[in-house]
Every structure is written in C-alpha cells, then in structure tokens.
Amino acid sequence: MSKAHHRRKQPEAVRQQLLEVAAKLSLEKGPASVTLDAVSQAAGVSKGGLLHHFPNKLSLLDGLFADLTEKLDRALAERMREDPHPKGRFTRAYAAVFFQPEGLQDGDQWKVLTVALISEPHLRERWRQWMERHLAENVGTDSFLDALLVRYAVDGLWLADLLGAPVIDAEARAAMLARLLALSRS
Amino acid sequence: MSKAHHRRKQPEAVRQQLLEVAAKLSLEKGPASVTLDAVSQAAGVSKGGLLHHFPNKLSLLDGLFADLTEKLDRALAERMREDPHPKGRFTRAYAAVFFQPEGLQDGDQWKVLTVALISEPHLRERWRQWMERHLAENVGTDSFLDALLVRYAVDGLWLADLLGAPVIDAEARAAMLARLLALSRS
DNA sequence: ATAAACATACCGTCTGGACGGTTTTATGTC
DNA sequence: GACATAAAACCGTCCAGACGGTATGTTTAT
C-alpha cells in the first residue's frame, strides 16, 4: 500500500510530472530508456497509474509532443508581441526563444522535442505541419533567404548544444545572436 | 537451410551489408527498430552470423559510427583538396558535402549519423571529439564568426531535411548554397 | 587440419499492456 | 449537513512477445 492512494489527488500534477520525467529520461539516457516502468517509477506512480493517464505508450509520446509544442507556441507568441519591427519578426522570436529561455530548464525542453522527433518517425509529420503552419502565418515577413538561413543556423546551434559539441563561450554566443538578429532584419 | 551457408563467403561484404541495413532501418523506421533480429534478417544473415561480426549490439552501433565518420572524413578531405582558397576551406567543404553528395544514397548517410548520435548518448562524446579534432586542424582558417554560422546553418538544413520539414525547392536550395559559400569567404 | 564464417536452438530479462481491485473525490438528494 | 452513488484516480499482478546474448553445431576456405 503506497502513498499515492492516500495523498490528495492531483491528476493534472501527476500527468505533468509523468511528461517531465519522460522528457528528462529521454534527454539524459536516450529515448530507448523511456519505458513505462522507468517513467512511472521515476514519477512515483505505478505503471497502472501511468496507463490511466495515457492509455498506451504512443499517447504518452504524443502528449509530450503536444505539451512541448504548446509551450513553444506560447513562448514564440510572447516574443513576437514585443517586437515592433515586422520584417523577420517570427525569425527573431525563433532565435530568441532558443537563446534566452525563460527558465533554466526550459532550454532543455526544445532539445527533448528534437530527440523525440528524431527517434519517433511518426511525430515527424506533425512537426512538419507545425512548421508549415507557422511559416504560412508569417509568409509576408519571414520568407526571405536570410530569414531561412537564420532559422537553420538556430536549429544547428540547438543541435550542437544537444550533442554537447565543443562549447562556445558566452561571448561568442552573444556575438552569434547579434549577428543572427542583424541578418533577420535583412 | 538458407543460402548463406552455400554461397561464396565474403565476410567483408556481409559486414558492410549489415551496417548498411542498420543505417537504413534506423533512418526509415526509427532507431528503436534497429534490433539484432531485424538487422540480421534484412541483411540475409542469421542472428548468429551478425553476432559473429559484431559481438554485441554496442559494437554494431560503434561500427556504424566509425564507418560513417570515416566516409565523412574522406569526403571532406577530397573537397578541401580541391579548394584553392584557404580561408573557410573546411566550412565550405562541410557545406558542399551536405549539398552535393556524390551518390544518391550517400546523402542519407549523414542523416543516419545524426539519428545515431541523438538516440545513443554514449556516441555523443565520440562525436564531440571528432568535431573538436577537425576544428583544431582548421583553427587558422575556419574559426571566424560567419564560418561558425555557416556550419550551424548547414546542420540546421541537414536536420530539417531529416525531419522532412517543408521542402525548399531546388532553386532556393541553390541560392542558399551560394549564400553560405559567400559567407564562408568572409 | 584448422580456423573463419556462418546457422540453429535456446535462455533470462525486459517491455507494453490487459485486468480486476481499492481508495478518493465529485455530485446529487433529502 | 448527512448520506448514497457514481466516476475518477490510482495500485498490483500477470502475461505474451520481443529482445540481447550464449552455446553449440555445421559448412567453407586455406
């Protein structure tokens, strides 16, 4: 008889906890380590409990994807709202969200997204649609060559970070951000 | 009684076949589908046969990594040899190798590398070393800001390609390459 | 003859998930 | 506010299949 039975029920918190644990595991020990046993145990819930929130593993991964893209959407929207210059607005938000995550651990979340995307081919199509939607929404302001270039560079930096590639110091990083922002204005 | 028993033995060819099959599986059906059973069967070899060449799964993945980086090394060296302009030489080779793979299927190999790198955390350190070595070898010619930017952009494009992101047409692609090459010269 | 290059059979463990039970919470009724 | 009732939120157990790996045999090349 464990504690969860008797603690105050907070289904939404448990659900969130499960997603966070899955994300952390995927990032630190690779996507193969994201098993129902490992996730439920690390989240302090039985496997039955996990399967109550997510009827199968696929829905767990889908939930993770949905959660992450939602957060990404919010972060992007906030950045774009604060940007008075129309041209390249989406691209700058894209760069800023990666470079200056609000919380410390939030930066890792985008990495998790990448890992999930690569290890679960069935998510790729949904990512494609997400990207397509945002590009369509900002076709007037962010479809010039250098904007595309900047977004690619951000993705690359993101990937390098994820792979723990040779670290570039804070100074170089700031210079890079400045360069990217400059390119995004034309 | 299958054929392998009776065909002429070509250990090196079988080994190569196993690596290719593993790469293909990883790319098309995700890294989780790379099982000893699946790989050996798709390669037309028994599991015992596979385990003869690679004593365990880890050594199979390591072999794949080694094979891919070796090919990458060769492709880069060739490009660099043909480039008379010193500044940004490595960066241009890096870009060219991705944009113009010699064979059709060779382009996919770099994608496989990325997938492997992300799904197998233990390979990340080796990749870090690979990258570090190449950067050190070309520190005089390829360490300026825009060179870094270009390589990041190439990685991003590579990733977008891998994820099947909204396709950019051949025209835009050519323009992008031209832009990257220009940036690599200063 | 010997070693390399395979094949076949088998084992222990892990994994996803089905299932039935138990406890907590929300809701409605009086 | 007491009480019944249903639904939601869990737990614990079990299972069939998949997986990595071992052990041992058989064929082929030298």
Image: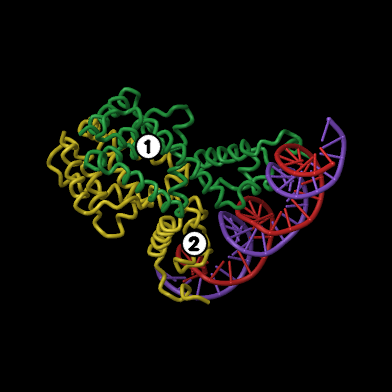
Chain colours: A green, B yellow, C red, D purple
- Position above or below: A8 against C8: above
Q: Chain of mark 2?
A: B
Q: Is residue B174 left or right of residue B158?
A: left
- Position above or below: B144 against A52: above
**Residue with the most extreme left position:** B84
- Which part of the image, by quadrant, shows the N terminus of chain A? top right
**Residue with the most extreme top position:** A171
Across and down, in percent, residue A79 comes to 37, 30
Residue at position x 19%, y 44% in the image: B80
Residue B137 can be seen in this image: no
Across and down, in percent, residue B185 comes to 15, 36
- Position above or below: B21 against A19: below
- Residue identifier under label 1: A158
Q: Amino acid at mark 2?
A: Leu
Q: Quadrant of residue C27?
A: top right
Q: Are marks 1 and 2 on the same chain?
A: no
Residue at position x 34%, y 54% in the image: B109
| Residue in front for this viewpoint, A178 or B43 | A178
Residue at position x 51%, y 38% in the image: A28
Question: Distance of mark 1 from mark 2, alpha carbons?
Answer: 36 Å
Q: Are marks 1 and 2 in contact (CB under 8 Å)?
A: no
| Residue in front for this viewpoint, A111 or B75 | A111
Across and down, in percent, residue B7 comes to 42, 75
Residue at position x 56%, y 45% in the image: A33
**Pointer 2: residues within 10 angstroms few (<14), some, or many (20+)?**
many
Q: Amino acid at mark 1?
A: Trp
- Residue identifier under label 2: B50
- Which part of the image, by quadrant, shows the C terminus of chain A? top left
Residue B139, disc: none
